[in-house]
Structures are given as structure tokens and as C-alpha cells.
Amino acid sequence: MGTDSGGSPVLMDLEELLATRLLVQGNSGSGKSHLLRRLLEGSAGLVQQVVIDPEGDFVSLSEAFGHVSIDAAEYSLPDVARLAVRIREHRASVVLNLEGLELEEQMRCAAALLGGLFEAPRELWYPALVVVDEAQVFAPAGAGDVSDDARRASLGAMTNLMCRGRKRGLAGVIATQRLAKLAKNVAAEASNFLMGRTFLDIDMLRAADLLGMERRQAEVIRDLERGQFLALGPAISRRPISVRIGAVKTAAKSGSPMLIPLPSAPAADMEDLLFAPGTNEPPPPPPPPPPAVPADDIIRNLAAPAPPPVPQTPVIGPEEQETVVAEIFAEIVAEGGQHPPASLYQDFQLRCRMRGASAALDMTEFGRRLAMARAGIADPDDYEESIALGACLPDEMLAPFLAIAVAARQGADCPSDAALAALYGTSSAGRARRMLAFIEEKGLIVCRTDLSGRRSITLPHLGWTTAAAPPDPSTPSRLARIDARPRRSATGR
Ligand SMILES: Nc1ncnc2c1ncn2[C@@H]1O[C@H](COP(=O)(O)OP(=O)(O)OP(=O)(O)O)[C@@H](O)[C@H]1O
Ligand SMILES: [Mg+2]
């Protein structure tokens, strides 16, 4: 593989590796892919190799060593699974190039190949190294943005490879940038480790754990150079040793970025260059000619009456607009249910569009209007001061506060705990009472309980008080009595 700190060669015992698998970890650029390439090149004539290559880095092995490069984008998943059986049958060394596939497709494709290798009939269980670069992609530690079934398929195939592959002749060799992102059971099945430069504590600690080192000792992993790895395992060394990985014959497609002197053109020239009309560029392709129309069709079209113009979306006048918006709020309130504000807002916008209203409320204004509608306020002018007072409360307390204001203004019964809880978005009377205490602390209301246990609430700024009512009435539907609308028309406001 390379040389140790004293310059002596470090060897990899291939037969031992087949039985004990290998895990390589190191940050991006630490030299993992280079290390895998060194191992593949060194063992190419000795053992069958199957490489799962998410970046298309290893296809260069085909020219120098005769690996068959399989461009995954050209095959269906069942094709890949069938190919896997042939690969075992003919003991062919292959590189499965997953470059150009979406992440989820990469996972499914790797799962199909690994599954096919794993399920091959017993008489085909010849030994093979199965090398997986960027293994955290195929065996992720947690759920990511991919669908559950893709993740399950790929994680299952990787687990089979690392946990149950040995008997079938499959020896997993996996590399990952982040141990913490690799499924634990997949990492734990390797008995050989090559740990490269690692910065994050969480990865370093897991690496130390796998190498059986103390945390303090593990600090050396931080100081490793590119291409230098701490090695341990029955196929390499029974004690942790440092290995400097040797040179490779084939090249990776992607090299390391190097500094290249920048052009010395002054800024103004650069601007000219960027915006200059293209002189030596090929002209853009002309638009395709319209398809030829038979003369008969042209004549028929000329004779036909012009199609009616597409009607514009009807936009209703400002007054009707307000009525429609109020109706929509009433519908949303009547439908009830506990939905997150964002989805209610989306639903509101959709309903507006469906009725030709312009839905010109932002999310905050929508929240305010919804609270008013829930409290039974149809005309905001009646409750201007209450709404202004409620502005200092958290959004979710506005509806219950306004419901109290409505009841108080009408002298109706004080809303029950259950009614206030529903408006607060909870079913807990205790939470409703804590909310009341909070609003009272703010000085917006004063609660009073009389000797028979009936509660009344006063809004001291406005001089309104609700009628006293039991906070937990056995009779249902007190909320019906705090509807503001009939009373408002009775007072003429
Ligand atoms: N032992 C080495 N000797 C010489 N060059 C090396 C060695 N190891 C790595 N390099 C070079 O360093 C660069 C990065 O290495 P490599 O691509 O193997 O990193 P990596 O760990 O696989 O990174 P990533 O996780 O981003 O794929 C490459 O250009 C590679 O040629
Ligand atoms: Mg790499």
C-alpha cells in the first residue's frame, strides 16, 4: 500500500482482507479515492473487483487493467441485477459508473447490483473485492431527502455486503468522508481500518472508537497529511501504524485544485470581454422553421370565423372583494380543525383566486383577520381598540382575547375555558387558564370569580365586562352566545 513512518513497505494481505473487510475514512481531499485506486491497481491481477463509483472516478481502470465500465444511466434496474449475476459467473472486474444519475437513482442502482451479486447461486460464490466509494451515500446513518424505499433498498444491500457477504465471497471495501454519516452497523462490520485526516470531533471520536484508541491518542488523526493514514486490522497490522500511500498508475478524472495565476487584464477590459458581442463564437442556431401546412388547411382556416378571445380572469370590484374575503374567512372558521397557519394561508389564497378576488393580504394581516373571524368579529371598525391592544400578545392569543372582547362588549357570558382553549388551538383547559393569566399579567384583562364560582372578565382599557358564567359549564355551546353580529346591528354600529 505504501510505506510506514520508518520508510518500510506496508503490505495488504489480500486473503485476510477478503475475510475481514476494510473501512477507509477521511475528510474530502484526504486521499481515500487515491488509496482505493492503489489497492485496486495492486490487486487487479489477483482478485476479481467490483467498484461502485458515484463520481465516475475509476473508469480509467478499464484501459490499464481491463475493467469493464458499466454506464449505469444506460441500463434499467432489472438489467443491472442480471448483469450482476453474469459478473459473478464470468468473474469479471467491473466499474459501475453512477455519474450523471440523481442521488436516489444512484442508490437504487447500487442496490440492484449489490443485490444481484449477493443473490447469485452458490456455485458462483467466487471471491471478489466490492469497493464502494462515498459509502455514506449508499448506507446513510439517518433519513435524508431521498425516498424511504430507495434508502431502505440501498442500506439493506450495503448491510448484506458488510454483514453477510463473506460467506458468499464478497469482501466489502468502503470509503467515507464522514463516519458519523455512515450507518453504524455497516461501519462496524469491517475489521480493517485506514483512517485519514479528520477534523470534526464527532468523526474523530468514532474513528478512535473503531481503532480502540483513547481520545487523546486519536488527536493524531487531525494532524495526518494528505495521503497519510492510520492503519489497523488483521490484513494490515495488528497495531496502529501510520502509512503513506504510494503512487498510482492510472489517473483520477478529478484532480486536486491548484492555484493558477489569474489573468492580468484591467477591470474595464474584463467588462468589455464579458459583454462583447460574440465574434468568433458560432451563431445561435436559427429557430426551427414552422411545419409546412397544406394549402387546403390554410384556405379552410382563412374561411373559418376567428376564435373567440380568451376571457381574462374576472377581477371583482373592491366592495365585492371585501364581501368575498369575509365569506372565505367565515368558511375557514366554520370548517374548524387545527391546521398550521402557513397552510391555512395557502388555502385562503387559493380560495381567493378561485373566486376572482385578489387576496392582497400578507401572512401577518391574514393571521389578524383570521383571529377576528374566529372571535366572531365581522366588522373590524367595531373592535379597532381591542385589536390594537391585542397587538402586544403572541399571535395565537389574539383570537381568544378578541372573543373575550366581543363577549365583554355585548355583556354576554364570559367564554368558558373549553371555548377559549379551542380558540387558542389546544384542548387543554389548563393551558387556556395559563393563557388568561398571561393576558392578565399584561394588564389587558382582569378576571374575577364570584362566590358561586362564576367568572367574569373586564377589559379595563375599554370599560367592558362580560356577564359572569361558570368557566366549565356542563351545558355545551356557550360560544354561540358570543357572536357579535346580531348585537352590532341592534346598536346600529
Ligand atoms: N498518497 C497520495 N500521493 C499523491 N497524491 C495523492 C495521494 N493521496 C491523494 N492524493 C491526491 O490528492 C487529491 C485528493 O485525493 P482523493 O481524490 O483521493 O481524495 P478523497 O479523500 O477521495 O476526497 P473526496 O472525499 O472529496 O473524494 C487527488 O488529486 C490525489 O491525486
Ligand atoms: Mg474521493
Image: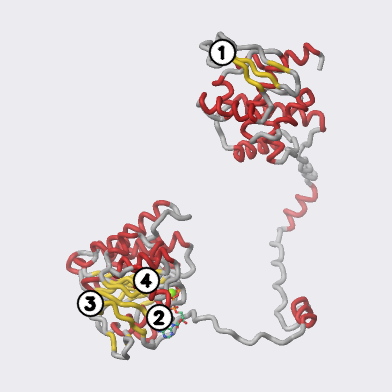
* In this view, 259 is above or below 369: below
Residue position for label 4: 175
Q: Residue at x 73, y 38 (%)?
A: 361
Q: Is residue 300 left or right of residue 104?
A: right
Q: Name the kind of residue labelled 4 in the image.
A: Ala
Q: Name the kind of residue labelled 3 in the image.
A: Arg
User: Circle 3 — which element?
Assistant: strand
Residue position for label 1: 470
N-term-proximal mark, 3 vs 1: 3
Ligand 1 under 8 Å from disc 2 Cβ: yes
User: Circle 4 — which element?
Assistant: strand
Ligand 2 under 8 Å from disc 4 Cβ: yes
* In this view, 249 is above or below 142: below
Gap between marks 4 and 1 measured at Cα: 68 Å
Q: Name the kind of residue labelled 2 in the image.
A: His
Residue position for label 3: 238
Give the number of the disc on residue 34: 2
CB of mark 3 within 8 Å of CB of mark 2? no
